[in-house]
Image (spheres, grey):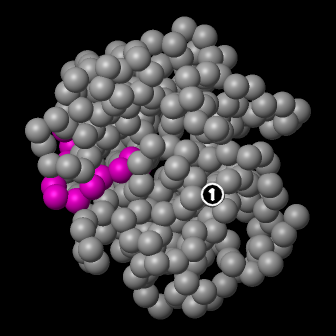
Amino acid sequence: MNYLKQSALFPGLVVFIIGCSSESDNGFDPWPIETTETLDSEPAWSPDGKQIAYNHGGTEIWLLELETMTSQALTPGSWPDWSPNGKRITFVRDHDIHVIDLDTEEVTRLTFWNECYYPSWSPDGERIAFDTNYNDPNGANVIWMMDSDGENKTDISQHGIGEWRSPDWSIDGSMILHIRYEAGGHPGPDLFIMDEYGNNPAKLTDNVRDDRHPKWSPCGGRIAWESYGSGNDPTSGVWVMNSDGSNQHLLASWAGRPSWSPDGSQIVYAGYNEDSDTVTLWVMNTDGTDPHPITHPEDYQ
């Protein structure tokens, strides 16, 4: 177990950021600038607010205990998502969805198609949404649903009109937030919502940046996401908006993979450490104030 020391706040927000090696395990590269080393990314706050699961080094899921600021390895994999009761974590390993029981550390494989990514647990804990290119005639990834034990896999997407990826459930379980690469649209993805059956879509963003990794706030009233432009676009970073798409604004430049705290007061994200030229986990208030790192390069030496 490694001690994670608290650091003084950096005076400014970040300048550069890079993709981590786990991106080869989820089908597309969300970090366009590759200038540094990503140590920690893909954070997911536990339902009780006491832990953060995250990807360390692009290959393993670790758990950070916030009370003691200590961290330890849990299992190989990427893109963790907590069950609503906090007893299990679903994640990606070897291009398929798995789940780990935190009491027994027993791992169960839920998909066997070799191209399944971004698992997201429903609020009632009964289902998991994910994206996959399984059975798509064009090899495009679309959104599927399955029971939390891997049974009853159901395709809820339309095919031949682009890609639907990175699902995240609304607090009442009636809507699914996700990204779409639209056929005939600009090359990058935009944010959409649809109902749990894949119908009644509504487009939330429409800009020249690439919008990815959206997360609904615990109250359901706001959405945080990662948005990147080309080159050194100063508007690239973590953004927030109302759940109807209004009041879009930048919170942290050159940052990504946001996840809300259960009480909705903070956002954890992957941020840049200027002194070490590395990416680790940061936390800020949901108005963008008080950004500071909570994992550090020296913790892994």
**Magenta residues?**
203-214
Q: Is residue 95 left or right of residue 180?
A: right
Q: As displayed, is residue 208 above or below residue 104? A: below
Q: Residue at x 27, y 55 (%)?
A: 210
In the rendered image, is residue 241 in sight?
no
Element class at badge 1: loop
- Indicate yes or no whether the magenta region holds residue 70: no
Q: Is residue 114 left or right of residue 155?
A: right
Q: Residue at x 83, y 73 (%)?
A: 3
The x, y position of residue 255, in whole percent, is 43, 68
Q: Residue at x 16, y 55 (%)?
A: 207
The x, y position of residue 273, in whole percent, is 55, 82
Which quadrant is home to the C terminus? bottom right
Q: How many marks?
A: 1
In the rendered structure, which amino acid carries the disc numbered 1?
Gly
Q: Residue furthest front?
A: 138
- Indicate yes or no whether the magenta region holds residue 208: yes
Nearest the viewer among 131 and 87 is: 131
The x, y position of residue 173, in whole percent, is 44, 25
Q: Is residue 169 left or right of residue 102?
A: left
The x, y position of residue 154, in whole percent, is 45, 12
Q: As displayed, is residue 285 above or below residue 225? A: below
In the rendered image, is residue 117 in sight?
yes
Q: Which residue is mark 1?
A: 58
